[in-house]
Image (tube, rainbow, N blue to C red):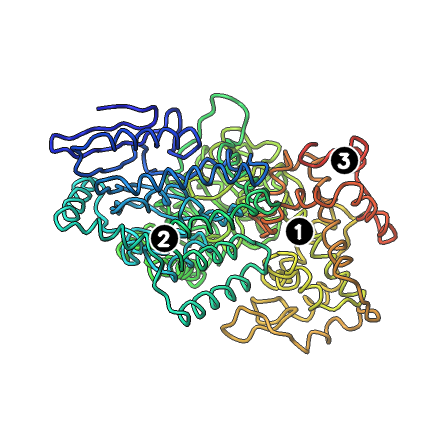
């Protein structure tokens, strides 16, 4: 056996090379310039051994094949010249691997992402394990770039243009069965039989020399007629532009690289790939998306307390109080991670709503081949329903998800106390109500905490962990760890009206209603905001949240900050007329039965017409100023008040909790792009509108010291 720092080469008695990748002092394997140079030395050694019949490549990391390229190195590229050097280096070394004088097979166990998958495309064969952690993807578009170490060219020649476009331009995950069906991998097997299966595939290729034929095919252009090309790429271009609104240049650039490169020999296609990726690497969009990646990685390390020596308690069983849509979503998040759940409500039909929610969510995964029916059956067996509080005696965590009403919540907490163990954690899913106030209703306030999930639970990654004055470090650390086990991104915030996300979101929604009353057209406001990059306009969002729910949440902030936040007259009027949004089919829009997409509703004006002044024509720029500046100012107050601990938490909370456009990097990164001096000018411009546009001390200090949010 020979050894390189990150690679070991073993030659078996029958002259097969087994190469093991094990990056020193790292949890995952990834490709940096240093590692690529090591790989090149491995290639030279393999070439020097004329007796080798074939090679198998594996990872020594648990549940990770190769995580991809080193993002830190990628993000530090300052110009196209530096970018070209790194891209050409990866391409050349991977091409050398693909030209080894014997057949090769990658044994993929666990995650194979980005540059790792591009490397595996240079093998003659790929065999994957069918264990749950095995997933393949080319997710580079999520970082504002695209796979340029041969990914756009080799995948297209291997699986065809359709699958290549679908996977590269979306960056979606590919699971073993799907990978096999599209021709991305040659076989899949149980984890403990992976090497035997890979060797069998390799031997079969040797026996009939198909590996040589495959190489020749993959070096040539893709055989597409002009009509096929026009249809395939034209359709894809229209779809991508519809999805990205032109805000994300990487998917279109990737499509161009695939289209232009596929009609050329591989070596020329690789040059097209380089040419089109270079402008992306140093773009603002890529830098913003990479920064989000780094902030996400930082959040994974957050424990919930700086106190050393506190280990998270184990959450073996959970109870959910309230089995509606939200309660059912929370229950499903638990059983998906194999945590047993008891759902408690006041009536059987309410409990059925929670069960139906779980069936719908897991059933959708079965339909998409992301889960076997038997696995869904097993997980559904982990949910039980009850009308009694007695089962709470066995659980480690109780999550309350009932109506957003302080009195009702407090009564429920008092009523369950006789059934709750002294060490059981009680968490409220409240979105606005004071955790300190609610904790007065429990015997052990040190075990009480806020755990705010966002709807729909199975899609929204954020969880706000709200720490009250009496919440213990032990409780906080345990709940943060639990949220991570659910696959969520927890952000720890201090107790305060609206906490983090709703504290910022409600002024934004109120401003939309204020603009409407001033005579700015509803559709105009919606259009400006969606073009800015928000996933939906403010009025659509209000309909989704529920007008009645938004009104109640608004009342909390009005009571807390009456100097700058007023109860929306528009929401009052709609609520009075029973226009509650999607939940009853009419809000700012109407929702015909069975439809979630709103349609214009001519009867809306009957409710709000008396509130609207003469029609007002504001520019797109002015509408954005009015909508964004109150949010930015409120974010500085959240930081000044210590509700959020840092700029990172504000931006990640807004991205993961509201869908604030990632390509803009987050609310405060967007504020940095505006510039503090410009923000002060805008505040002055709208000074007459009230205190909500008054600059905060933080803004004034930043202007004085000439610092950005990310410097401050």
Q: Nearer the viewer, residue 589 or 700?
A: 700
Q: Position of residue 242 (x, y in %)?
A: 55, 64
Is disc 3 placed on a helix, strand or loop?
A: helix
Can see residue 50? yes
Q: Is residue 163 left or right of residue 414?
A: left
Per the image, label 2 sits on a secondary structure element best described as helix
Q: Which residue is mark 3?
A: 698
Sequence order check, earlier mark of 2 and 3? 2
- Tell me the residue at 66%/46% (across/down): 667
Bin the neighbour count of mark 1 within 10 Å (Cα to Cα): few under 14, some 14-19, many 20 and up. Answer: some
Q: Which residue is mark 2?
A: 155
User: Does label 1 or label 3 sit earlier along the sequence?
Assistant: 1
Indicate whether 213 appears above or below 643.
below
- Residue 180 placement, left or right of 163: left
- Label 2 or label 1, whichever lies nearer to me, is 2
Kindly report the distance in space between the C-alpha atoms of the residues bearing marks 2 and 1.
42 Å
Single out the mark in the foreground, 2 or 3: 2
Which quadrant of the figure contains the C terminus? top right
Which residue bears the numbered disc 1? Answer: 505
């Amino acid at each position: 056996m020979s050894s390189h720092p990150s690679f070991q080469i073993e030659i078996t008695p029958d002259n097969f090379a087994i190469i093991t990748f094990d990056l020193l002092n790292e949890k995952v394997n990834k490709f940096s310039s240093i590692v690529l140079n090591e790989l090149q030395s491995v290639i030279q050694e393999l070439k020097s051994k004329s007796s080798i019949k074939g090679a198998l490549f594996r990872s020594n990391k648990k549940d990770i094949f190769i995580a991809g390229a080193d993002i830190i190195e990628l993000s530090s590229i300052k110009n196209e010249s530096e970018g070209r050097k790194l891209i050409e280096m990866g391409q050349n070394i991977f091409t050398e691997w693909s030209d080894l004088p014997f057949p090769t097979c990658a044994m993929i166990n666990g995650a194979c992402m980005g540059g790792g998958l591009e490397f595996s495309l240079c093998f003659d064969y790929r065999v994957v394990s069918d264990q749950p952690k095995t997933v393949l993807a080319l997710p580079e578009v999520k970082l504002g770039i695209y796979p340029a170490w041969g990914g756009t060219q080799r995948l297209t020649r291997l699986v065809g243009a359709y699958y290549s476009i679908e996977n590269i331009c979306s960056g979606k995950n590919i699971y073993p069965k799907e990978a096999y069906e599209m021709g991305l991998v040659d076989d899949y097997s149980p984890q403990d039989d992976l090497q035997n299966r890979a060797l069998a595939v390799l031997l079969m290729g040797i026996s009939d020399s198909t590996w040589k034929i495959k190489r020749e095919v993959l070096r040539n252009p893709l055989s597409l007629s002009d009509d096929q090309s026009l249809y395939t790429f034209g359709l894809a271009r229209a779809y991508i532009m519809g999805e990205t609104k032109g805000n994300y240049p990487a998917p279109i650039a990737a499509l161009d690289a695939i289209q232009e490169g596929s009609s050329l020999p591989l070596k020329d296609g690789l040059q097209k790939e380089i040419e089109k990726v270079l402008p992306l690497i140093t773009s603002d969009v890529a830098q913003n998306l990479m920064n989000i990646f780094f902030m996400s990685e930082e959040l994974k390390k957050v424990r919930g307390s700086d106190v050393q020596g506190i280990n998270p308690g184990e959450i073996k069983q959970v109870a959910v109080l309230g089995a509606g849509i939200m309660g059912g979503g929370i229950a499903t998040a638990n059983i998906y991670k194999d945590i047993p759940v008891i759902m408690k409500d006041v009536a059987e039909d309410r409990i059925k709503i929670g069960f139906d929610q779980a069936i719908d969510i897991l059933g959708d995964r079965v339909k998409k081949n992301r889960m076997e029916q038997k696995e869904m059956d097993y997980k559904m067996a982990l949910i039980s329903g009850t009308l009694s509080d007695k089962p709470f005696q066995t659980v480690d965590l109780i999550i309350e998800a009932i109506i957003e009403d302080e009195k009702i919540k407090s009564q429920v907490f008092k009523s369950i106390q006789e059934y709750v163990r002294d060490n059981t954690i009680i968490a409220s899913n409240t979105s606005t109500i004071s955790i300190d106030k609610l904790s007065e209703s429990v015997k052990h306030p040190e075990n009480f905490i806020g755990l705010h999930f966002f709807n729909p639970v199975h899609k929204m990654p954020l969880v706000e962990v709200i720490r009250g004055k009496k919440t213990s470090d032990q409780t906080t650390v345990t709940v943060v760890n639990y949220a991570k086990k659910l696959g969520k991104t927890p952000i720890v915030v201090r107790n305060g009206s609206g906490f983090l996300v709703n504290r910022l979101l409600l002024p934004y929604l109120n401003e939309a209603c204020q603009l409407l009353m001033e005579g700015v057209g509803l559709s105009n406001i919606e259009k400006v905001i969606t073009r800015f990059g928000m996933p939906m306009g403010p009025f659509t969002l209000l309909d989704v949240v529920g007008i009645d729910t938004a009104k109640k949440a608004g009342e909390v902030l009005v009571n807390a900050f009456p100097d700058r936040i007023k109860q929306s007259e528009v929401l009052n009027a709609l609520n009075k007329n029973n226009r509650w949004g999607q939940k009853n089919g009419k809000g700012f829009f109407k929702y015909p039965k069975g439809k979630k997409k709103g349609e214009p509703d001519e009867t809306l004006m009957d409710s709000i017409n008396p509130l609207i002044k003469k029609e007002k024509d504001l520019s797109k720029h002015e509408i954005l100023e009015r909508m964004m500046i109150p949010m930015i100012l409120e974010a500085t107050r959240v930081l000044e008040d210590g509700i959020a601990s840092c700029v990172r938490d504000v931006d990640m909370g807004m991205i993961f909790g509201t869908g604030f456009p990632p390509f803009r990097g987050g609310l405060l990164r967007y504020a940095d792009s505006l510039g503090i001096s410009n923000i002060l000018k805008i505040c002055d411009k709208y000074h007459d509108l009230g205190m909500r546009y008054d600059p905060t001390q933080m803004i004034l200090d930043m202007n004085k010291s000439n610092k950005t949010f990310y410097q401050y």
